[in-house]
Amino acid sequence: MRGDDHTIYCVLSKRGEQVICPYCSEGETRVIDSREHDRSPQVRRRRECPECDKRFTTYERYQMELVVVKRDKSREDFDREKLKTGLVRACNKRPVSPDILDGVVNKIENKLRAKHTEVSTQMIGNMVMQELKRIDKVAYIRFASVYRDFDDIKSFEQEVKLLTN
Ligand SMILES: [Zn+2]
């Protein structure tokens, strides 16, 4: 058995993307064993470096495209900065730290990417509201007032009353 000190978790953007050797930084390593799991997007691989002959283990996951479908049916790539901006705006002058907001963005992005390649703005909005409701009620109300459908305004007003009473 040769050394197996290194286990690398990597997110690859496309099939066949190279994993760099952790020992000598050689840019191309050979796959010697590959184990896929039905219920996991993650593949465990044993790799060998042709340069230094060392072996290591990788857990590789492919970053699938995530497309957001907007209300007017137009589509755009998921943009975590945009999500963050919406959260920052809702939490303006509220006692919510940037770390907490980063955590929310990560949580939502991971949840989305784990299951979907296409999501609606409404779905993202609902996930954000769930999180904000827990973190800061004022931020939640601000965010909800922007994101909720106008049709929904009655039930929204009721909810605001419940929260503020
Ligand atoms: Zn190497």
Image: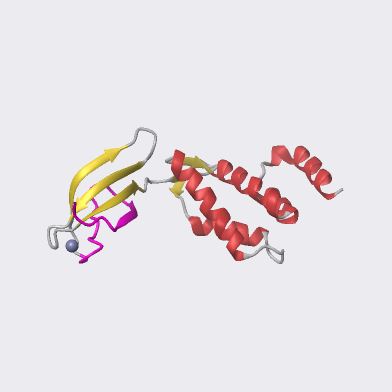
Secondary structure mostly seen in the magenta stretch = loop
* Residue 24 on the magenta segment: yes
Q: Position of residue 69 (x, y in %)?
A: 49, 42
Asked if residue 63 lies left or right of residue 97, the reply is left
* Residue 96 on the magenta segment: no
- Between 97 and 68, the one lying in front of the other is 97
Ligand 1 quadrant in view: bottom left
Q: Is residue 2 visible?
A: yes
Asked if residue 30 lies left or right of residue 107, the reply is left
Asked if residue 34 lies left or right of residue 68, the reply is left
Q: Position of residue 163 (x, y in %)?
A: 80, 47
Residue drawn where x is 21% and y is 51% of the image: 47
| The image quarter in which residue 104 lies | bottom right
Q: Position of residue 31 (x, y in %)?
A: 19, 48
Q: Which residues are magenta?
A: 1-25
Residue drawn where x is 29% and y is 51% of the image: 58
Residue drawn where x is 24% and y is 52% of the image: 17
Residue drawn where x is 61% and y is 57% of the image: 87
- Between 112 and 53, the one lying in front of the other is 53
Q: How many marks?
A: 0
Residue occupying the far right of the picture: 165
Q: Position of residue 150 (x, y in %)?
A: 70, 41
